[in-house]
Amino acid sequence: MKVEIDLGAIKRNFGRVRMAANKPLILMCKADAYGHGAARVVRAVDADFYGVATEEEGVPLRENAKQVLVTAPSFYKLPLCRRYDMIPLVGDMEIAKRAVAIGLKRCHIKINSGMNRLGFTGGKECFEAVRLLTLGGVKVEGVATHYKDGSEKTVRNQNAAFLRGVKAVKAALADDARLLTSVTGSGALFSKEFDYLRVGLAAYGYSSGKATAGIPLEPAMKVTSEVIKTKIVERGDTLGYSGIYRAPQRLKAYTVLGGYGDGVSRADVGRKVIAAGQRLSVAAVSMDSFEMISDRVDLKVGARVIILSKGINAAYVAKRRGTIPYEVLLGYDVPRAERIYV
């Protein structure tokens, strides 16, 4: 299989979102830039900060002299933030104590404004954590929160909780140092007062709701494979494990390279792929290949098959699977795929 990444599309998407938001963006590159290859993406797209989930994800980006935010720092891996001068989002008192103990130089504070995943809850927790950090020599440079969805009611409520936390952080600092505030891009329409938006899925070509609706986004990933076997199945013949597909009539069937180990899911049975300019159905999926059927297209071994493209994108595949585009894109970030950057 070939996974083709259009770096120009990512750069254009990022620029369009930045223009629409009229403020600087933090480019989220966690999970290998949503499966697009973080090392190549950060070299192509100019942002003030790049966000990752873990310390290990951030180290290669720091080697490229990029400013890195670690959104889910680990108690055991936190020393990597000190060694590579990365900026963890501290949202737990034990992590704060650990930051002081290892001599961390700087951090941002993560505030739980309503998602109830990571972050300090309430002004008291924020105040106590910041006092602990600053007295221990850790410079607090920013404050962040994460929206659970992008609806106006949710964002307004979470903004109020976030601002209470920001106020407590400022009170604990007791100086005039400017704090950078950042929120997730899903709430962009109702978060004009904050400094940065953290943008993920939109940069890779997929709308994340109202905030990016109307912005012309280009899916940056294309996945193709090839036919490795052609055959005729008669009426009643089956394809795949447990005979999951039974032919209703005489059909042409094609085995295509790419299965569970390549991001093609059993839930893809029934979805469309493209070959010879036609949409064909996936009939069965196995570990390393899938079966494709047609009553009208005549293909030969070696024919290219488009699994993901602008025409059949991750939003379409996600809807078929009952999931979200993020999960679909990550599925194709596999070792045996040939990666091509344009």
Image (tube, rainbow, N blue to C red):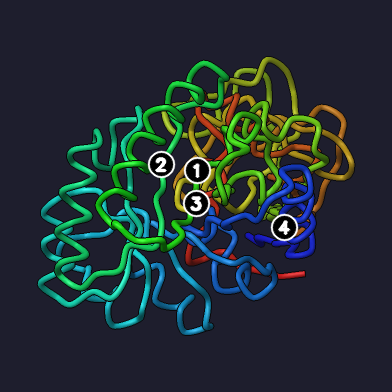
Q: Amino acid at mark 4?
A: Ile
Q: Residues within 10 Å of mark 3 (few under 14, many from 20)?
A: some
The x and y percentages for residue 169 are 30, 48
Number of the label disc, if any, that sits on residue 10: 4
Height in image: 63 above or below 341? below
- Work out which quarter of the rendered image holds the N terminus and state it: bottom right
Mark 3 or mark 4, which has the lower sequence index? 4
Q: Residues within 10 Å of mark 4 (few under 14, many from 20)?
A: many
Q: Mark 3 or mark 4, which is nearer to you?
A: 4
Kindly identify which residue carries mark 3.
288
Mark 3 or mark 1, which has the lower sequence index? 1
Residue at 25 percent of width and 49 percent of height: 91
The x and y percentages for residue 215 are 80, 38
Q: Amino acid at mark 3?
A: Asp
The x and y percentages for residue 275 are 81, 44
Mark 2 or mark 1, which has the lower sequence index? 2
Q: Mark 3 or mark 1, which is nearer to you?
A: 1
Q: Mark 1 or mark 4, which is nearer to you?
A: 1
Kindly identify which residue carries mark 2.
145
Mark 1 or mark 4, which has the lower sequence index? 4
Q: Amino acid at mark 2?
A: Thr
Kindly identify which residue carries mark 1.
183
Residue at 67 percent of width and 19 percent of height: 235
Give the left or right position of residue 8, taking residue 253 as reference.
right
